[in-house]
Amino acid sequence: MAALLFLAQTLRIAIPYLFAAAGGVVSERAGLIGLTLEGYMLGGAFGAALGSYYGHSAWIGVLSGIGGGALLALVYGVSAIRFRADQVVIGIAINLLAIGLTRFFLRLAFGSSSNSPRVAGFGAEHAGTGVSALLSNPMIWLGVIAIPVIGWVLYRTPFGLRVRAVGEHPVAARSVGIPVPRVRYSAVILSGILAGLGGVYLVLDQHQFTDQMTAGRGFIALAATIFGRWDPLRVGLACLLFAAAETLQIQLQGAQLIPSQFVEMIPYVLTIVALAGVVGRAVPPAALGKVAE
Amino acid sequence: MSSSGEVAREASIRSQTAPRSGAVWIRLEESLLPSLVALLVAAIVGDILIVVFGQSPGAVYRLLLEGTWGNSYGFGQVLYKATTLTFTGLAIAFALRAGLFNIGAESQLAAGGFAAATVGLALPPGLPWIATLPVYVAAAALGGGIVGGTAGVLKARFGAHEVITTIMLNFVVLALLSYLTAAHLNVPETLHTTEIRSGALPRFSDFFASFHGSAVNVVLLLAVLACAGAWWYLFHTRRGFELRAVGLQPEAAEYGGVRPGVVWTRAMAISGAIAGLGGLNFVLGYKHYYEEGFAGGAGFLGIAVALVGGTHPLGAALAALLFATISQGGLAVNALVPKQFVEVLQAVVIIAVAVSVPEVRRMIRAQRKRA
């Protein structure tokens, strides 16, 4: 039973990572750096709060959350693809924009500077944290299949082949007739939708939006994308690993074995180690961050 | 470096392709115009947000100016905020000259402030600030420099991309500092250390009564010195020349006898040290203790400062004033529109600059070709 609860809690923590990291894989495999995941998540979360509150339905929240993530992704896409702006700069700015916009509209829509009122979510009011509550939440199911679906799209569909081609060698891709900008736009908006769903999950799970509620989860997803070497299966495992470490830390909190700050560091340290190539080098897509001519 | 002349030729090819006459004007146009376009775009977005909130843009902008440059308290606060932003913006601009993107200024700033506070807690109380200042400067530079240098080594030695490592280091370092503060140094129930009893720096209000209440202090002069020093290093020393050569074309610089790895490590360490010095502003000039989260995004806003300032030390100082004005202005207009609207403005400025730099440059070049 303890093991089952541990798995359930790991899964709950992993869901937003799985969504956002799926988006990270799509974006980075198409050549666009995934620094924006945090911003997409926040945009998705706020969109979900708006939709769920004013639409009185969790599903409307899901749709408007998707819209929030996709909108920020569109800003990123237009800046980086059409105007060839530096992806790192735009990426950081998108995150700042997401924080600023959600705070501004939090004041405008809900008259608060810290949180939204209670919004509709999935399942019963006080379903608790048990396994059955987990299984009845459709967002959990969507999160679980996000990575496998992205793996299938990337490796088994023509669109996936095109995404990988424009991320590795856009010039060669164009020479065989692939519309490079269109593929990149599709990939970046898909990534906004996926990461946005990560934010949607948070809002519908906690039944409210709070200021900066994503709290760095987008960067953990980016870490998982890199630590998993841009391969969906490994990225999914990385998300579960990071979530398991957090769960362990929460469950051992009383024991005070390791300070929580050291557990927080795990994803980031592992990513640095992976990039430094101590155990098998992480090699990014060749055209990642480069301007497509 | 017998063949650094080769590097000189490689590095100066860019400027030689432009016609000699009016070259300065063209360079000025290319570096200033994008920022002006960006500010215009930001102003328009700001207007929209203000109108959405049901206020008049004219009234809001007038209040913003009055609350910042219109009285000496507001101006003092602008200068205080500009001090930290000058350090982080300068740090990022410096690294960019070496072709490196330092996204880690946030944690370097915090590490600098933490190192200074730790040293301060160990110093005997009551020493004059003139005597302790060099110790604090060394501590802050070392704190930030170690964090920055780590990213430099990771790039030089292992080829790990500095954008990702500096982001990851941000989280690692901030968590580490949080642990150290919580476990060893903090006043119970707070996020800050006990007060430093030695070497608190004088505020401007000690000399000019009209600055009363604002936190601007002598670290501002340090920021100006840092800008001058970075400018001298970049444009008047051999190492600065090597740094810029590596930034323009690492392969060419290597062919010219410069070792890019060494330059990268040095550039990141110096960049981190500059950001670390910014920590003195809060720790020694304002609160006299280290507090978790005091960096408050100044490291990320530094990216905007570096870009709007055209990655030039002087430009960084001016851009820091601009962004500090926007920040402080948010507080001034909070009665009319939520202060969060300036956060949106800052993000829009960054996006607009990043978009308009390549775009405006292309337009200028196309126009020149037609003429």
Image (cartoon, coloured by chain):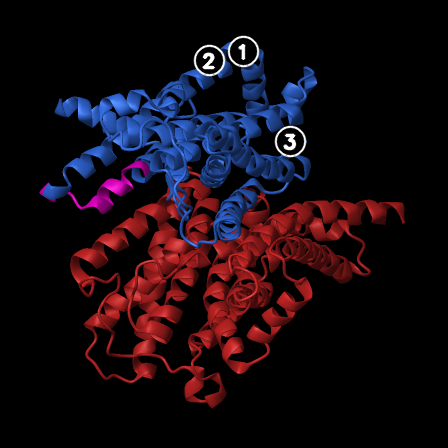
Chain colours: A blue, B red
Q: Chain of mark 1?
A: A
In the drawing, does residue A217 fall left or right of residue A185? left
Q: Position of residue B81 (x, y in %)?
A: 48, 68
Q: CA distance from mark 1 to mark 3?
A: 23 Å
Q: Which residues are magenta?
A: A255-267
Disc number placed over residue A292 in the picture, else none: 3
For marks 1 and 3, the one nearer the N-term is: 1
Determine if the magenta segment contains residue A266: yes
Q: Hey, what amino acid is under mark 3?
A: Ala
Q: Hey, what amino acid is under mark 2?
A: Trp
**Badge count:** 3
Q: In which quadrant of the rendered view does residue A160 lie?
A: top right
The crowding category of the residue bearing disc 2, from other C-alpha atoms within 10 Å (few below 14, some 14 to 19, many at least 20), is few
Q: CA distance from mark 1 to mark 2?
A: 7 Å
Residue visible at 73% across and 48% down in the picture:
B361
Give the secondary structure at mark 3.
loop
For mark 1, what is the residue?
A157
Q: Quadrant of the C terminus of chain A?
A: top right
For mark 2, what is the residue?
A152
- Furthest residue toward right: B371
Q: Quadrant of the N terminus of chain A?
A: top left
Q: Answer above or below: position of B9 versus A4.
A: below
